[in-house]
Image: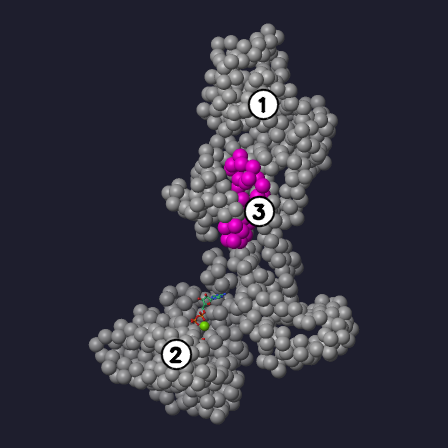
Amino acid sequence: MKVLKFGGTSVGSSKNINNVIKILEDYSKTDLVICVVSAVGGVTDKLLLAGKQAQNKEDNYTESFNTIKDIHLNIIRELNPSNNASILDFVEGKLNELKSLLDGIYLINELSPKTSDKLVSYGEILSSYIISETMKHRGLVAELKNSQELIVTNSNFSKAEVNYNITNRNIQEYFQSASQKITILPGFISKSVTGEQTTLGRGGSDFTAAILAAALKVEQLEIWTDVSGMFTTNPKLVKQAYPIDRISYQEAMELSHFGAKVLYPPTVQPVLDLNIPIHIKNTLEPESAGTIISNEETNSTNAVKGISNISNIALLTLQGSGMVGIPGFSKRLFETLSQEKINIILITQASSEHSICLGIDEAEAEKAKISIDKTFENEIALHKIDPIIVENGLSIIALVGDNMKNHQGISGKMFSTLGKNNINIRAIAQGASEKNISAVILEKDVKKALNTLHEQFFESKTKQLNVFITGVGNVGERLVEQIKQQRKYLKENLKINLRITGLSNSRTMIFNEEGIDLSTWKEQLAEGEKATLEGFFENTKALNLRNSIFVDVTANADVANLYANYLRESIGVVACNKIACSSDLENYKLLKRLSLKYNAPFLFETNVGAGLPIIDTLNNLIASGDKITSIHAVLSGSLNFVFNNFNDKTKFYDVVKQAAAEGYTEPDPRIDLSGVDVARKILILARESGVEMNLEDIQNTSFLSSSGLKSESVDDFYKTLISDESHYQNIYASAKAKDCQLKYVAQFNNGKASVGLEEIPQGHPFYNLKGKDNIVMFYTQRYPEQPMIIKGAGAGADVTASGLFADIIRIGND
Ligand code: ADP
Ligand code: ASP
Ligand code: MG
């Protein structure tokens, strides 16, 4: 004999009901089958809604009724197109009763818990009738038995408690004499000792099945639902969740108590003592293995079995100095809640006894506050304690596992993982048995918390990075293409799941929390919403994804001004934009502080030397205890290009124009030619070496003509290049006469920095620098005579993009 229960989705359409009938038919070939069914998916909610509307005198209760009616009539017509008259007769009769009941509620303007139970029972009455009759029509030996005639409870409406003596006897007697192969019973509904209709609590059809299984001591209880078992966490919120093969009763109970809706928590109790395994199966995929809940040892190595969550939690805090060391406060507090029939989901009390924190259902928070404040009104009046504090909009998340007690560091890992993702923890509870570690967090953080904890505890350490890129011009586009090309490699070799979740240029922006499809990103971006910098930040923040990284591929000061906002949300910042790091010292220090405080990396390798690993190397030298004594560098790809191509046969104007056309200069070439760009770079290196300095502190000897220096626009500037050609030719001639090369050099020496054009003699490491190459020589305590040298292309879209990419991977490897 087997007991099977089919949930709302499983009986939610004629197609699914056909699946159910097929499964029952197969089982009944070898076994007696007892089948419990829920109401058609969504119908219980709709009945309750119609009841509320009628009670509130809202005329649209009739519309809700009609929807319920249509759902059932359609299913009947689809299941039995040619032979449905008798079924329709009965169902229409029941629907008429239901309509009268709703009309009654509307008239008297009242919906008591007793009437509400009567109202919702129609859902299961109808579904069980339709299914059993359809089976009979198809020639199966099936009978319907109303569970209200078997399951007897007290009168605690909406969540009645079972009287097992009478119930077990009823069930055993009925099945002793029953001769049919398949018995269909409605789940969820029952009757009180005095004959009133009661229900077993939302989701209670599972419980009905467990009561039957235990009374009849069957070998297995099967719960058929719309997912392939009990998952490591809620599969609707975490894509990577997967079904657990085997799990203990205790673990299943903890998970379901803490929100794993797939199993109604009381279900385990009746079958636990009898050691009847519960098998969770998927009606839509009957071949999937599902989950077996039993007492058998599992060979899983993972101490954490699952992660669950309960939404709509309110936290009540009772606090005050008058509570310390005085017994009886908690007794009175709990008694008050018990009298009000308010269920406590979580309790914490600090050892100072100065406060007690309780998690309860948000819907009951107001009632709880009123009654507790009343209980303690004297103490509150005497200022011994404060009026109770209520916080809403919270959720509980819980790690569950029998074996967690044998493993150290699980709670540490849990809280540091949450902390790293800027998830604020409002309260914590961990029982001494350590089967469950719970944390109360903001509702808005639940999805992020579940995903990041799931990644930490279940996903062979794959780290998901969510990248938001602003500025997909030349460099940005290369970056997107490089990411597209390398995604598979990163996943397989570095266990980094790199996704682009936001993209923006100056016109439009797009977001996709599942990761933007990179094969069509350009088309999608062209169709995106209008871009604003604040809008981009607000969207990134609202998505609230774990390991979020904002990538700035602009040269825009307004974008740089938003870094602090991103960092405060624990969103990492990767920038090739130099403005922030070369801005006012206080701002640079603030960003560094925020990065540490909010655990959000702030990386800007490409600020100096594009993709060359200059800043990273410098950071490693410092971190390992070395000291920088001086830096000599050629850091401007554009100025190198200019002076490598300028001679007595070319014109200075033409060479600068060519550099601009090839993308080697900033949009405003004066930033390069005036030396400001190089000054910013040496400033950043000086700051990263530990010296506090501002741009004004850097000595900048310009080689530009005085009219070039004074020019007020880019066009004017270009004109001066033509008119002052002889000025530039003189510079060239002077260097040539000494057999020197012209290089724009940045120096940092004993805390002082300077930039300027220099005549470099033969034999010097800078002499042969070609094209747009950069070179940096670090003289340090460990490299006193022979400097450490980094050299290579220091400009260009591809290398800059790869430098940004390297920063992103650095965060991934963190
Ligand atoms: P039924 O109507 O079959 O009783 P429920 O909706 O009550 O189905 O329960 C199944 C749902 O439980 C799944 O669709 C899923 O969204 C949700 N769920 C939440 N947590 C879990 C979990 N850990 N494992 C499986 N399902 C879960
Ligand atoms: N139909 C009831 C509900 O929705 C019982 C169940 O589905 O288990 O709560
Ligand atoms: Mg359910």
SS of the residue at dot 2?
helix
Residue at figure coordinates x 43%, y 65% from the top left:
228
SS of the residue at dot 1?
loop
Residue 76: which quarter of the image? Answer: bottom left
Three-letter code, disc 3: Tyr
The CB of the residue at mark 2 lies under 8 Å from ligand 2: yes
Residue at figure coordinates x 52%, y 59% from the top left:
447
Question: Mark 3 = which residue?
Answer: 566
- Give coordinates of residue 92: x percent, y percent: 30, 82
Three-letter code, disc 2: Gly
Circle 2 crowding by C-alpha within 10 Å: few under 14, some 14–19, many from 20: many
| The magenta segment | 538-563
Three-letter code, disc 1: Ser
Question: Mark 2 = which residue?
Answer: 123
Mark 3 or 1, nearer chain start: 3
Q: Is residue 680 in the magenta section?
A: no
Of tags 3 and 2, which is closer to the observer?
3
Mark 2 or 1, nearer chain start: 2
Residue 107: which quarter of the image? Answer: bottom left
Question: Mark 1 = which residue?
Answer: 674
Residue at figure coordinates x 57%, y 29% from the top left:
609
Circle 1 crowding by C-alpha within 10 Å: few under 14, some 14–19, many from 20: many
